[in-house]
Image: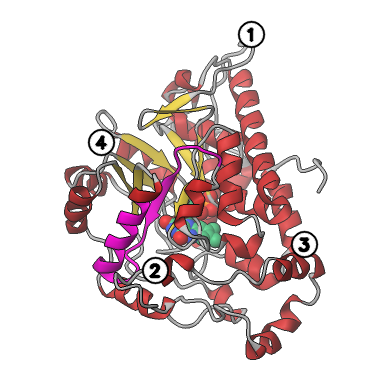
C-alpha cells in the first residue's frame, strides 16, 4: 500500500478493487432500497458553512473530551461486525490504530475477535465495548461480565436492532441466510465450492485470508453459555431476536455494570430522553449507516431535536454518513460532542490493515484542520450554529448535488 490514499472515497475505491464483491457489499450495503444510506450523505451536503474570513487561526486545536476521556480529535471508530474478514489485523488492528491516533475504538460483540483481544491488543487506549443481547439476557450478562473483567469501562448498548436489517446485496451475493446470519461461518468443501468462483478474481485478499486461517467465526458467541458449552451463532441470534434490548434492560445493565453506559441508535429527542431516563450517560444518534430501518431519517437532520432534548446534561454523539473532516465540523457545529465512523475505517482496514485505518483517521484529521482554518475557527470548541447557514438559507444557496434528500 502506498500513501497516495488522499480521501475516504479513494480508500473506498481501493477496497472495492481488492475485496471480493460479496465482502465489499457486506461493508457497503444498506437495508432494502438503501434510501437512508444515501440520505445520510445528501443531508451533510445540504449544510453549508458561514466562514469568518481574514482570520489567521494558525494550527487549530482539535482536542476534546468524551465522557471525561481526552481525545486528540473528535472522531471515534464505530462498532462493526466481521472485521477479520476484511483484513487479518481485524478488530485489534483497528483498536491499535485508534489508540495511536489518541482516540477510542468501540469494539463490537460481532467484531470477529474475542472481546478481550480488543482491549489487550488494542494499544492500551480506553476502548469501549458494544453489546448485543446475543444469547438473550443470560448471554448478554456473560458478555457484560467479561467486558468488565477485560478492562472496558464504557458499554455501548445498540437499541436499534430488534431484528437484523434486510440487506438485499448480501442475499443476492449468497452471503447471508434468512434472518441475517452469515451463510458461511466455517470453511468446508461445500462452502469452498460455492464461494470459490466469487473470490477467485481477488488473489491478494484470498492469500491474506487463507494465511490468517479463514477467520470467519464469532468467538464471542462461542463463550456465551455459563456452563461453557458451545452455542451456534444461529441459536444465539434467535435468543437475541426473541428478546431484543429494551429500556427495561438498562436497569439490569446499570446494576451489573459499574462504568458508563451509552445508548446507540437514537433518532429522536423523545428516545434520547427515554435513554437518559433509563440511565444512559451519553447517546449516539445513529441509523446504523442505513443498515436497519430504511427511510429512517438522516442522522444530521435529527441532531438538533436530540440536542434540544438532552444536550444540556448529556453528551450527544453521532454517526452515519461521515466521509469528510468537513462533515465532522458540520456535526459539531450543530451540537454533537464527537462523531463515529463505520465504513470509512473499514475501507482503510481492508486496504492496509492497522496502517490503513490510521491513514483514514489522519485524512479526516487533516480535513478537519483545514476546514477550521478556512472557517476562521481556532478550535473545535468554537464550532457552533453560527458556523453554518440555517437550513432555509442553505437550501436557497445550495449546491446542485445536494438536491432531493430525505428529511427536513
Ligand atoms: C459492516 C458493518 C457492520 C456493522 N456492525 C455493527 C455492529 O455489529 N453493531 C453496531 O452497533 N453497529 C454496527 N454497524 C453500524 C456502525 O456501528 C455505524 O453505526 C455505521 O457504520 C455508521 O455509518 P457509516 O458506515 O456511514 O459511517 C456496522 C456497520 C457496518 C458498515
Q: Residue furthest front?
A: 227
- Residue at screen point 46% across, 75% down: 180
Q: Upstream in the sequence, badge 3 or badge 4?
A: 3
Q: Which residues are magenta?
A: 123-147
User: Is the residue marked by circle 2 packed among few (<14), some (14-19), or many (20+) residues within 10 Å?
Assistant: some
Distance CA(mark 2)–CA(mark 3): 35 Å
Q: CA distance from mark 3 to mark 1?
A: 41 Å
Q: Do the residues bearing badges 1 and 4 touch, measured as CB atoms within 8 Å? A: no
Cα distance between the residues tagged 3 and 4: 43 Å
Label 1 residue SS: loop
Q: Residues within 10 Å of mark 3 (few under 14, many from 20)?
A: few
Residue named by callout 1: 56
Mark found first going from the N terminus, 2 or 3: 3
Task: Say whether residue 240 is left or right of residue 344.
Answer: left
Residue at image x 20%, y 44%?
279
Asked if 272 appears above or below 213 in the picture, the reply is: above
> Mark 2 vs mark 4: which is more N-terminal?
2
Q: Is mark 2 within 8 Å of ligand 1?
A: no
Q: Nearer the viewer, mark 2 or mark 4?
A: 2
In front: label 3 or label 4 = 3
Left or right side of 242 for 375 = right
Residue 316 on image: x %, y %: 35, 37
Label 2, secondary structure: give it.
Answer: loop
* Rendered position, 23 above or below 37: below
The question of residue 128 being in magenta is answered with: yes
Amino acid at each position: 500500500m502506498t500513501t497516495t490514499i488522499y480521501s475516504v472515497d479513494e480508500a473506498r475505491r481501493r477496497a472495492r478493487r481488492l475485496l471480493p464483491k460479496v465482502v465489499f457489499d457486506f461493508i457497503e450495503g444498506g437495508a432494502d432500497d438503501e434510501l437512508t444510506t444515501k440520505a445520510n450523505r445528501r443531508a451533510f451536503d445540504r449544510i453549508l458553512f458561514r466562514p469568518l474570513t481574514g482570520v489567521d487561526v494558525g494550527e487549530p486545536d482539535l482536542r476534546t473530551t468524551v465522557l471525561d476521556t481526552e481525545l486528540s480529535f473528535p472522531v471515534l471508530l464505530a462498532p462493526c461486525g466481521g472485521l477479520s474478514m476484511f483484513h487479518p489485523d481485524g478488530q485489534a488492528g483497528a483498536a491499535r490504530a485508534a489508540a495511536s491516533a489518541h482516540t477510542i475504538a468501540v469494539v463490537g460483540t460481532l467484531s470477529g475477535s474475542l472481546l478481550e483481544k480488543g482491549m489487550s491488543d488494542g494499544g492500551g487506549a480506553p476502548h469501549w465495548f458494544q453489546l448485543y443481547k446475543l444469547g438473550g439476557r443470560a448471554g448478554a450478562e456473560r458478555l457484560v461480565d467479561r467486558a468488565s473483567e477485560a478492562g472496558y469501562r464504557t458499554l455501548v448498548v445498540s437499541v436499534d436492532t430488534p431484528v437484523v436489517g434486510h440487506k438485499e446485496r448480501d442475499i443476492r451475493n449468497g452471503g447471508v441466510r434468512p434472518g441475517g446470519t452469515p451463510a458461511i461461518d466455517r470453511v468446508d468443501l461445500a462452502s469452498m465450492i460455492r464461494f470459490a468462483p466469487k473470490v477467485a478474481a481477488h488473489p491478494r485478499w484470498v492469500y491474506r485470508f487463507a494465511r490468517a486461517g479463514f477467520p470467519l467465526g464469532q468467538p464471542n458467541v462461542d463463550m456465551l453459555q455459563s456452563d461453557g458449552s458451545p452455542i451456534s451463532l444461529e441459536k444465539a441470534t434467535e435468543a437475541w431476536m426473541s428478546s431484543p434490548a429494551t429500556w427495561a434492560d438498562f436497569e439490569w445493565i446499570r446494576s451489573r455494570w459499574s462504568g458508563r453506559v451509552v445508548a446507540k441508535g437514537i433518532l429522536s429527542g423523545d428516545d434520547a430522553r427515554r435513554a437518559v431516563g433509563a440511565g444512559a450517560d451519553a447517546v449516539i444518534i445513529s441509523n446504523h449507516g442505513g443498515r436497519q430501518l430504511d427511510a429512517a431519517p438522516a442522522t444530521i437532520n435529527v441532531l438538533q431535536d436530540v440536542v434540544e432534548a438532552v444536550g444540556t446534561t448529556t453528551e450527544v454523539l453521532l454517526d452515519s454518513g461521515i466521509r469528510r473532516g468537513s462533515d465532522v465540523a458540520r456535526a459539531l457545529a450543530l451540537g454533537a460532542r464527537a462523531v463515529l465512523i463505520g465504513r470509512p475505517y473499514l475501507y482503510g482496514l481492508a486496504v492496509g490493515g492497522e496502517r490503513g485505518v490510521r491513514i483514514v483517521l489522519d485524512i479526516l484529521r487533516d480535513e478537519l484542520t483545514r476546514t477550521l482554518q478556512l472557517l476562521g475557527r481556532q478550535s473545535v470548541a468554537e464550532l457552533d450554529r453560527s458556523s453554518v447557514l440555517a437550513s432555509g438559507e442553505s437550501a436557497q444557496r445550495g449546491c446542485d448535488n445536494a438536491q432531493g434528500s430525505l428529511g427536513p
